[in-house]
Image (spheres, grey):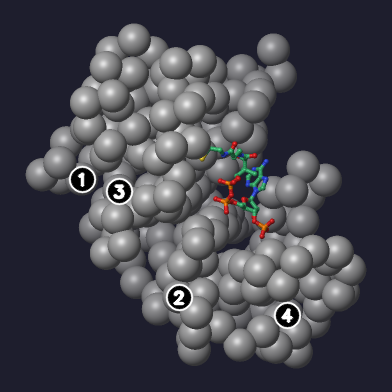
Amino acid sequence: MEPRVRTHPSFPDARLAVLALDGVVVAPEALHAREQPLFAALEATDARRREWFAGRRAARAALTALGYEDIATLRRDNGAPNLAGHGADQLHVAITHGKRLAAAVAAHAAGRWPHVGIDVVDAEDLARVRAVAKRVMKPDELARATADPLHARLAWGAREAVAKATNTGMFVFALSKCWTLAIDTEDRAVQVNLDGIQVVYEPLDDGGVLVLAGASPAAYEAAQAAART
Ligand SMILES: CC(C)(COP(=O)(O)OP(=O)(O)OC[C@H]1O[C@@H](n2cnc3c(N)ncnc32)[C@H](O)[C@@H]1OP(=O)(O)O)[C@@H](O)C(=O)NCCC(=O)NCCS
């Protein structure tokens, strides 16, 4: 099965690709030639190999839809995607996988939101999010998250998506320096405390939620600087 590729109204310059994991046939030759050695070297369970494969397929589909057909998604030391190929330095991609889907978002440096991030929070993640909520969330955020599971999922998913959009990771930046201020359920938007960052979400049919984040160049630089301190 091929990933479904589309745009999102809040990120018209970006391309979003989603792939249901249960339809995925793992075929290493379907990966970019430069991705194949990484896949071969993965020492992981079948489930992890499947999600890695599906994430790369989604990333390739999103990048192809942007007009870049020959970009490989390699890996940085910290686990973040590292794009290689002609035009790669002008592109940004983020990958997520949940229990039932893999998804990727790709954007060009010239777009409105050049730095993009994505996260799926599964229905099953709620208990784990609630277990860490007191340590991680701000008091107002915690109150909302306690009252409403959607707020809990988004408090976590927004941080994960922002961590990826700013290429900072969760633990040195987003967990402590990003938090949600309000959720607009009509526009499906999440207001966060950081300037130059846009976050939106889509409820999934299975009770999970897909979160997309975009960072302006200034917001990306500010997050990078904050992550170093
Ligand atoms: C790794 C991390 C970026 C995301 O992890 P996650 O939400 O568990 O997993 P996701 O499937 O959404 O994302 C994984 C993808 O993020 C990307 N990624 C990993 N590290 C990254 C980083 N530092 N920056 C940007 N992207 C990163 C990778 O593409 C990875 O997929 P791949 O290894 O197949 O290429 C990081 O935020 C993390 O460690 N989170 C902790 C998760 C946790 O504690 N969960 C408990 C509560 S639910």
Query: Label 3 is placed on what type of residue?
Result: Tyr
| Along the viewing direction, whichever of 13 and 147 lies nearer the viewer | 147
Residue at the image point whose x is 30% and y is 48% from the top: 201
Judged left or right of residue 129, residue 33 is right
> Which residue in the protein does label 4 denote?
32
Disc nearest the viewer among 3 and 2: 2
Which of marks 2 and 3 precedes in the sequence?
2
Q: Distance between the Cα atoms at labels 4 and 3?
A: 30 Å
Vertically, is 139 above or below 10?
above
Disc nearest the viewer among 1 and 2: 2
Which of marks 3 and 4 precedes in the sequence?
4
Disc 1 packing (10 Å; few <14; some 14–19; many ≥20) = some
Residue 162 shows up from this direction: no
> Which residue in the protein does label 2 denote?
20
Q: Distance between the Cα atoms at labels 3 and 2?
A: 18 Å
| Along the viewing direction, whichever of 122 and 96 lies nearer the viewer | 122
Which of marks 3 and 1 precedes in the sequence?
1
Which of marks 4 and 1 precedes in the sequence?
4
Query: Label 1 is placed on what type of residue?
Result: Arg
Disc 3 packing (10 Å; few <14; some 14–19; many ≥20) = many
Residue 42 shows up from this direction: yes
**Residue 133 x/y as whole percent:** 44, 23
